[in-house]
Amino acid sequence: MTTSQSGRDVVDVLTSDHRDVTALIGEIWSVRDPMIRRDLTDTAISELVRHAVAEEMYVYPAMKKYLPDGEKSVQHDIEEHKELEATMKRLEAVDVSGAEFDDALRKLETVLADHVRDEEAEQFPELRRQIPRTELTELAGKVETAKKLAPTRPHPGAPNSELFHKLVGPGVGLVDRLRDKLTGRATR
Ligand SMILES: [Fe+2]
Ligand SMILES: [Fe+2]
């Protein structure tokens, strides 16, 4: 709906996150190499945690403030985020070559598709109807800034892959550690 980067509103930003993570999951299915699979999975987890935290920090308050059913929509989304996180934790803990990984990835795909459908069909259009345009663009900026608080998982093979692992570390605990970094929660 908008052409320039700066004119993007919060719905544009969150919608493109949904596209990116969905595309990443498709990519994970298409590769067999365990190292690349692990890398892509960590990338998807990193993107999705970032997205969920940004929604929680900035979109939930706006939903509560402006949407008639805001409180209820937020509660529903919180449940979905919990399910997404539980599934991501399974994905970070299992061997990428095993059947359990495929199960968990299928589950993530399903829960994410539900999440995307609910938000894009109901909540996002409602946000655009109820929230002043200037505030929607302001929220876009806040969401973008919030996402930068945790290091981005580089694409597999990228030179700063090593740096990411140093900062966040691969495997078990990735979801929690990213969430901690983004929310400023103390890490153990
Ligand atoms: Fe979302
Ligand atoms: Fe959400």
Image: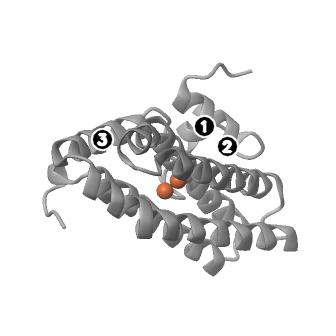
* Residue in the image at 42% along x and 43% along y: 59
Q: Nearer the viewer, residue 125 or 39?
A: 125
**How far across and down, in percent of the image, does residue 25 sit?**
59, 70
Check disc 3 and give the amino acid type. Leu
Say if mark 3 contacts mark 1, CB within 8 Å.
no
Q: Nearer the viewer, mark 3 or mark 1?
A: 3
Q: Residue furthest right?
A: 99
Q: Is residue 113 left or right of residue 144?
A: right
Q: Nearer the viewer, residue 63 or 82?
A: 63
Check disc 1 and give the amino acid type. Leu
Check disc 2 and give the amino acid type. Val
Q: Mark 3 falls on what kind of element? A: helix
Identify residue for label 2: 175
**Structural crowding at the residue carrying mark 1, measured as other residues with C-alpha within 10 Å and reported as few (<14), some (14–19) or many (≥20):** many
Q: What numbered label is drawn on residue 139?
A: 3
What number of labels is visible? Answer: 3
Q: Is residue 125 left or right of residue 135?
A: right
Say if mark 2 contacts mark 1, CB within 8 Å.
yes
Q: Nearer the viewer, mark 2 or mark 3?
A: 3
Q: Quadrant of the N terminus?
A: bottom left
**How far across and down, in percent of the image, does residue 54 sit?**
46, 41
Q: CA distance from mark 2 to mark 3?
A: 24 Å
* Residue in the image at 69% along x and 37% along y: 176
Q: What numbered label is drawn on residue 178?
A: 1
**How far across and down, in percent of the image, does residue 56 sit?**
51, 40
